[in-house]
Amino acid sequence: MVGKEEIYQLLREKGIWHEITEHPAVYNMAEMAQVDLPYPEADAKNLLVRDSKKRDYYLITVRGDKRVDLKEFRRQNQTRALTFASAEEMLDLLGLEPGSVTPLGLLNDAERRVTFCLDETFGAGESLIGVHPNDNTATLWLKVEDLLGLIRAHGNPVRLVPV
């Protein structure tokens, strides 16, 4: 299982630029708003959803202040009806507890069952994104392109989508 320290080690080994903001455990965006962040505009919100048949799973990542309309997401991406994954599914697929969901949890998805859907407003290249390092006691700041590269190298499908 890839945890917080393993994430930090991986970034060091690969020479990937990052900054770490340690903070008390946060379980939702309201709690996150109380944390003094260096790049609040780049903070991400993550939703793990599944289709009605429990066949297809999606990790939808958007800016922290953005609302996700699952019906619209479904229409745009031609999926079955979507609902939030259970805490048990989060643990089984990503090795994460509720409140700790992050794209870096995809590194624990051994079967590559989860498709990563990043809101296209994050852009690419040098733009930043803030995500948990598989633990909700820190926010890790990365370049979007580096995050996408880690997930693609692991083998999960990646899509940049309008949300």
Image (cartoon, grey):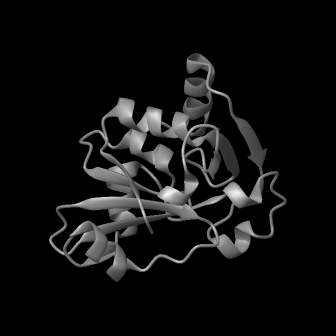
The percent position of residue 63, horizontal first and vertical second, equals 60, 64
Q: Measured along the vertical axis of the image, is residue 44 above or below residue 65?
A: above
Q: Nearer the viewer, residue 107 or 68?
A: 68
Q: Measured along the vertical axis of the image, is residue 139 above or below residue 84?
A: above
Can residue 101 be seen from the camera position used here? no
Q: Would you identify the image quadrant in which residue 140 lies?
A: top right
The residue lying at 33 percent from left, 60 percent from top is 58
The percent position of residue 76, horizontal first and vertical second, equals 30, 71
Q: Nearer the viewer, residue 78 or 132?
A: 78
Q: Would you identify the image quadrant in which residue 5 lies?
A: top right
Q: Nearer the viewer, residue 40 or 108?
A: 40
The residue lying at 45 percent from left, 46 percent from top is 105
The residue lying at 35 percent from left, 73 percent from top is 73
Quadrant, the N terminus: top left
Q: Measured along the vertical axis of the image, is residue 61 above or below residue 13?
A: below
The percent position of residue 162, horizontal first and vertical second, equals 43, 65
* Total numbered labels placed on residues in the image: 0
Is 37 placed left or right of 128 in the picture?
right
The residue lying at 32 percent from left, 77 percent from top is 83
Quadrant, the C terminus: bottom left
Q: Nearer the viewer, residue 16 or 107?
A: 16
Can residue 94 be seen from the camera position used here? yes
Is 138 placed left or right of 1 in the picture?
right
Is 149 placed left or right of 129 in the picture?
left
